[in-house]
Image (spheres, grey):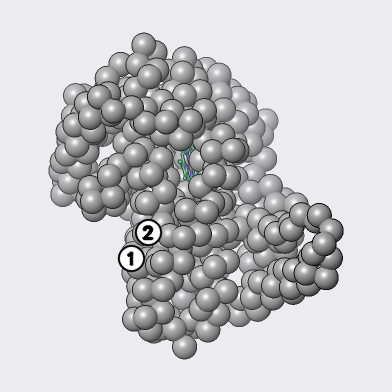
Amino acid sequence: MQITASLSVQRAEEIASSLDLRKLPADFYANPYPIYDWLREHEPIRRMPDGSLFLTRHADLVSVYKDAHTFSSDKQAEFTPKYGAGSPLHEHHTTSLVFNDPPLHTRVRKIIMGALSRRAIAEMEAGLIELVDSLLNKIEEKGGGDLIEDFASAIPVEIIGNLLGIPRQEREPLRAWSLAILGALEPKLSSTQEALGNKSVTEFKTYLQGLVKERRKHPGDPEHDVLTRLIQSEAELTETELLQNCIFILNAGHETTTNLIGNALIALQEHPQALQYALSIHERNTQEIRRQTTHFDQNSSEKMSFEAPSATQWDTAIDEFLRFESSNQLGNRRATRDFELAGQTYPAGTLLTLCIGAANRDPSVFDKPNELNLARTPNKHLAFGFGIHQCAGLSLARLEGRIAISRFLQRLPNYQLTQAPVRGGRARFRGFLKADFAVC
Ligand code: HEM
């Protein structure tokens, strides 16, 4: 099934030549990659109509990510005119760690990372398998469903809900809040989107105030519960910093992971060879389990430890899904001083847009970049960013992706989309809103 609309070189050049992130045509959202390819080849550091720079080369993104002193993540200068000082969206987006520089960034990141340790994530695996299997049971019973609603988005909301200790019956509004708050980061914002974004921050914050009050009375285990961790570090954080960073963690781990799972399972419908390969990973793993189990049975008198098959092939495949259709396509930085890029000097204050989607298909780093090659190694993609702001939840996202995608394929290898999936229609976050499928 063809899902990604093709775009002629001529049309790609036409869109690229007048690219303005606030006025993107529908065919950009359908397939931005030929446009990125054109820019990378002809104008890798493009001056945009608003004076900002749009970067598409992998090496340029890495050099910007590496130098956090020169390239600030602080967004006061952009968000004050965009949202209005004092508005809920302004307070949220200027307080979250991702849009701040040290020292606030360092303080918050340290606290969050403590709850996302390798051990804490490994301990989530069993619950995650149980959750994925229960979703698959329901899908099997119904004979299909919506890949996004019934599967991809149902996983991160539970995982992050658990991470913050949000009672299960209170999780329903989280997805809509998260979509509206992140949606407000789009380059062009309608008044409806802005109003919904502000309302969502206010409702989310009010909800969290109640939850924090409750958690103060009944603290959770700080090894696993990020909210308890943040509360116990209150000497280092103001109430606003605490609440807004909780909202950020929920948002950061939600739409991005939904899109990793949704984009991967939809891409496999368009790339039958990759689907065959993914199914063969499962087949090889099953054979390996059988081999090890038989060996174990035959030697049951001996004390042998049973080892699950290595997850390496799946880990490699997940990184390729992340590269090929990065959930987060654009990032921003602002120069704190004059700087040089590719031999040219630019002034302090310059705003840069880092196009992750383009860098991840840079032919100088990736062989045949427009191919979905699930065995690709090495894979130096930038889907999680790089440097001091590199995604704090990357191990959790990889685990969720691996368990969700591998178990889905294992149970439903003949799944088929029943109609063209509906794209989210966003430049910054790439994913689908709806993808109906049948279990064949
Ligand atoms: C496929 C899933 C994900 C993708 C593609 C993704 C992508 C990213 C990217 C590109 C950044 C860096 C932004 C920048 O440098 O400006 C980032 C930061 C961040 N992400 Fe993720 N993310 C994912 C999942 C998660 C999850 C599951 C969590 C939480 C549990 C999470 C928490 C964070 C946090 C806290 C930051 C801010 C880090 C900092 O500023 O130091 N992310 N993510």
SS of the residue at dot 1?
helix
Q: Tell me which residue sits at (53%, 57%) in the image.
A: 401
Q: Pinpoint residue 180: horizontal percent, then vertical percent.
A: 25, 48
Q: Which residue type does callout 2 highlight?
A: Ser
> In the figure, is residue 275 to the left or right of 389?
right
Residue 391, placed above or below residue 340: below
Q: Residue furthest bottom?
A: 440
> In the figure, is residue 339 to the left or right of 29?
right
Q: Which of 267 and 164 is in front in this view?
A: 164
Residue corresponding to mark 2: 153
Crowd rating for badge 1 (residues with CA inside 10 Å; few <14, some 14–19, many 20+)? some
Q: How far apart are marks 2 and 1 (CA)?
A: 6 Å
Quadrant in the rendering for residue 29:
bottom left
Q: Nearer the viewer, residue 28 or 102?
A: 102
Q: Which residue type does callout 1 highlight?
A: Glu
Q: Tags 2 and 1 in contact by the CB under 8 Å rule?
A: yes
Quadrant in the rendering for residue 320:
bottom right
Q: Pinpoint residue 187: horizontal percent, then vertical percent.
A: 34, 44
Residue corresponding to mark 1: 149
